[in-house]
Image: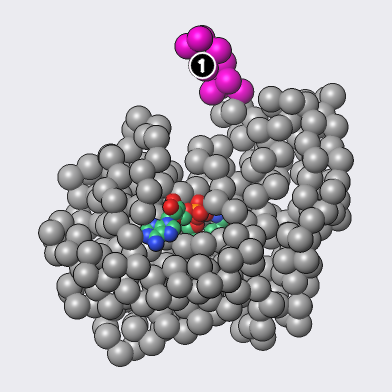
Amino acid sequence: MKPRVLVTGAGGQIGSELVTVLVQKYGEANVFATDKVRRPSRGAEPPLELLDILDRQAVERAIKRHGVDTVYHLAAILSAVGEANPDLAWDVNMNGLKNVLDAASSAGVDRLFWPSSIGVFGPDAPKVMAPQDANLNPTTMYGVTKVSGELLCEYYSLKHRLDVRSVRFPGLISSEAPPGGGTTDYAVEIFHSAIEKGSYDCFLREDATLPMMYMPDALRAAVQIMEVEGRRVRLHIGYNLAAMSFSPAELAAEIMKHIGAFKVTYSPDSRQKIADSWPQSIDDSDARKDWGWRPQYDLKGMVSDMIGRLRERQTAQAKDV
Ligand code: NAD
Ligand code: SER
């Protein structure tokens, strides 16, 4: 039988593409996309239903109304916005997560996906190939909520028999919805600026290497860990996930292979401090061993696909006017 799936934060960078994948897999009648705010539709996905995760009763009503057995909980505040507004980050990322876990448990949901992040690591974690069991001492409110969120998810898996599955996503690069205020957003903005203006002023230093992943790999990982049989999911905290690591200068050099005249300048701002606190690369051998995780895109493949998609969209828009 197909799962009946509710997605929170479905209008965001991940949600807006994940919903399309879920609809393709399980059918439109089985996928319920919710968000606090309505965004313009890209046409393919079902309309967003308004749902604020800070309203626990409303979350439970929505789960019961749609007969949901599976939740992808994506609503959150990302690292840069969270550092600018730590109270909001705590409220949405912790109280919101607890509301969703409580509502899901009491409405009899079987399985819940909740993404953690490389933000769980702090300056004392190894910079290269940060292991699954590194010390987790983040120096951002975002990271604090991700470490606490991982523990809360594990607690609900143990005590409430809610099967919570989680991964620590690296920075995500995508061609559809804009990113929501993270430290890794430069790696999306740079493509739009390269194509539209031929130049980009980067808010991180040219050598700020970070772990990254292309959205198609991230979506595959989320669905894969949710579908795999339970005995293969040994951890109910976030599994380390990796695909590629690069610096802004390395990304710019790869883009220049497609757009020769592209110029990049660097004006690091407060987000550089967040980037400095994170590892440069991640050891994801547990995810590979336990449930067969393998990324498909490296830097070269991701850049080529991103530029192809954005150029296609530019051509289609030019035809429309
Ligand atoms: P995003 O900021 O693009 O989207 C988050 C969505 O949550 C937005 O549409 C927003 O309207 C919604 N939201 C905020 N407050 C809400 C509330 N009170 N009730 C309901 N909806 C609310 O974020 P994203 O990039 O799609 O990230 C989704 C999840 O993945 C988050 O947990 C994030 O920490 C995690 N993650 C993202 C990345 C990345 O690079 N995008 C990397 C690691 C982890
Ligand atoms: N991409 C996210 C951020 O920068 C990492 O979780 O906030």
Q: Position of residue 190 (x, y in %)?
A: 71, 39
- Answer whether residue 278 is magenta in the image: no
Task: Name the residue located 30 percent from the left edge and 45 percent from the top edge.
Answer: 48
- Answer whether residue 319 is magenta in the image: yes
Task: Name the residue located 20 percent from the left edge and 60 percent from the top edge.
Answer: 62
Q: Nearer the viewer, residue 204 or 212?
A: 204
Range of the magenta residues? 311-321
The number of callouts visible is: 1
Q: Position of residue 126 (x, y in %)?
A: 76, 78
288 left or right of 53?
right
Q: Nearer the viewer, residue 233 or 303?
A: 303
Q: Secondary structure at mark 1?
A: helix
Residue 291 in view, yes or no: no
How is the rendered protein coloured?
A: one colour
- Displayed quadrant of residue 306: top right
What's the residue type where badge 1 is placed?
Ala
Q: Position of residue 77 (x, y in %)?
A: 51, 62
Reading the image, the residue beneath label 1 is: 316
Residue 306 in view, yes or no: yes
